Amino acid sequence: MGRAFVYVILGGGVAAGYAAHEFVKRGVSHGELCIISEEPVAPYERPALSKGYLLPEDPARLPAFHCCVGSNEERLTPKWYKENGIELVLGTRVKSADVRRKTLLTATGETITYKILIVATGARALKLEEFGVSGSDAESVCYLRDLADANRLVNVMQSSGGGNAVVIGGGYIGMECAASLVIGKINVTMVFPEAHCMARLFTPKIASFYEEFYRSKGVKFVKGTVLTSFDFDSNDKMTAVNLRDGTKLPADMVIVGIGIRPNTSLFEGQLTLEKGGIKVNGQMQSSNSSVYAVGDVATFPVKIFGETRRLEHVDSARKSARHAVAAIMEPEKTTEFDYLPFFYSRVFTLSWQFYGDSTGDVVHFGDFLGNSFGAYWVNKGHVVGSFLEGGTKEEYEAIAKITRLKPAIEDLSDLETQGLGFALTL
Ligand code: FAD
């Protein structure tokens, strides 16, 4: 049993949706393109799962957040794929790949052949078991990567109303889920090993603003330690979690957001891997010329930094996917991918954006008591990164532009005095 396509996208997440949109824009013919996804639904905007999806009132539900609504573009419903002659093979896991033969074998026993493959398998959530903690298969322990996880989390939240949740991890997932739990009237304690939240990006000063804001909403923080075990009563209902520092926290539910691992295993030994992802060139093409990789699974040259990186953010998934399709359909017209890293988050009434790289000296600016402040990162005498909370569209565009331009900075205190004005007047 088997089918053959010119183009196959393996994975049906954010990158797959944007790649499909780009294929159609560039005139793919009916029957040429197939998307295979383990998830049972057409590609959707994954960030919605930790934001609108968890809200107690008027929560976001599919089909409202199918790609590409996150970029204010067309919403690609299953009908759209059908009308454009794109085969959606959903609820189907690919269990092996042979890049020499150009075949994929599905868990249902079908062999799918391609001429060009785009690997968009994203990443999976790291499990506590991988850190030597057992018990995270319990009903009230939740992870959050896909729609099935989100539905489970919503159910656990509903049955924990008024109770206690412990959020493990102080990154995006932890911070966004903690906000949703509080809005859902669940008491939240966040636990993480670092000295402050969002440790990979935030400075202590920036983190302290968000932690204070969270405290004002009732969130407690236990830092510098990790979870070691769960307590359950005789009915297997969770009662508490135990931390390495000896603390016992009452808990009806736990959300774990401790990082992700890219889904590369199908290609290990077949494609060159680097920095945990599939290594690609500026056309998103892997070490096998018929295989491209995009989104969270791809390690690509970030021109502005002069080095390869693997990014775990939605904007990079969207743009790398579009770029790969451009390179496949119009190779002679497509230059090297020239991407400016961009991350964002929205919690409660807050909203921030970050562009570039968080290396070098940090210059904070603005009003940390009000909700309008930011920072520049200056490395080797040039602006390499910018952060802004509570900006307008024009202000965010200005910090993006300045980061791309990398202006020379002679005097850090002068930059501090000018603050956002520096970006706005450049
Ligand atoms: P994914 O969107 O993860 O898609 C991968 C797809 O491949 C999935 O459908 C998966 O089932 C499928 N797949 C994997 N292996 C197989 C296989 N063997 N066979 C078949 N199918 C397979 N980023 C931001 O910048 N800002 C945010 O606010 C933000 N919020 C987020 C909130 C949540 C809850 C999560 C989970 C992520 C968030 N992100 C955010 C990150 C962003 O969603 C990812 O960077 C983006 O989804 C990556 O897109 P992708 O297509 O590479 O991978």
Image: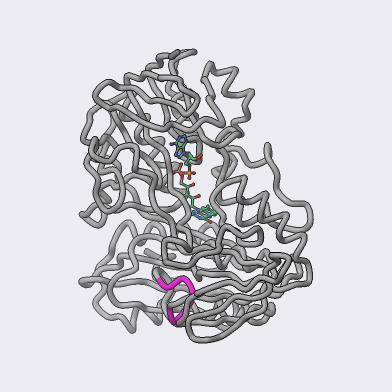
* 221 horizontally vs 122: left or right: right
As drawn, 301 above or below 15: below
Q: Quadrant of residue 33?
A: top left
- Name the residue located 66 percent from the left edge and 67 percent from the top edge: 253
Query: Which segment is the magenta one?
Result: 194-199
The percent coordinates of residue 275 (x first, y second) are 27, 53
- Name the residue located 62 percent from the left edge and 68 percent from the top edge: 178
Asked if residue 197 lies in the magenta stretch, the reply is yes
What is the magenta segment's predominant secondary structure? loop
The C terminus sits in image quarter = bottom left
The percent coordinates of residue 216 (x first, y second) are 67, 81
Asked if residue 126 lies in the magenta stretch, the reply is no
- Name the residue located 54 percent from the left edge and 43 percent from the top edge: 71
* 279 horizontally vs 372: left or right: left
The number of numbered discs placed on residues in the rendered structure image is 0
The N terminus sits in image quarter = top left
The percent coordinates of residue 353 (x first, y second) are 48, 62
Q: Quadrant of residue 7?
A: top left
Q: Is residue 236 visible?
A: yes
Q: Is residue 206 visible?
A: no
As drawn, 140 above or below 281: below
Colouring convention used in this rendered image of the protein: one colour
Is residue 16 or residue 193 the one in the foreground? Answer: 193
Q: Quadrant of residue 256?
A: bottom right
Is residue 134 or residue 310 the one in the foreground? Answer: 134
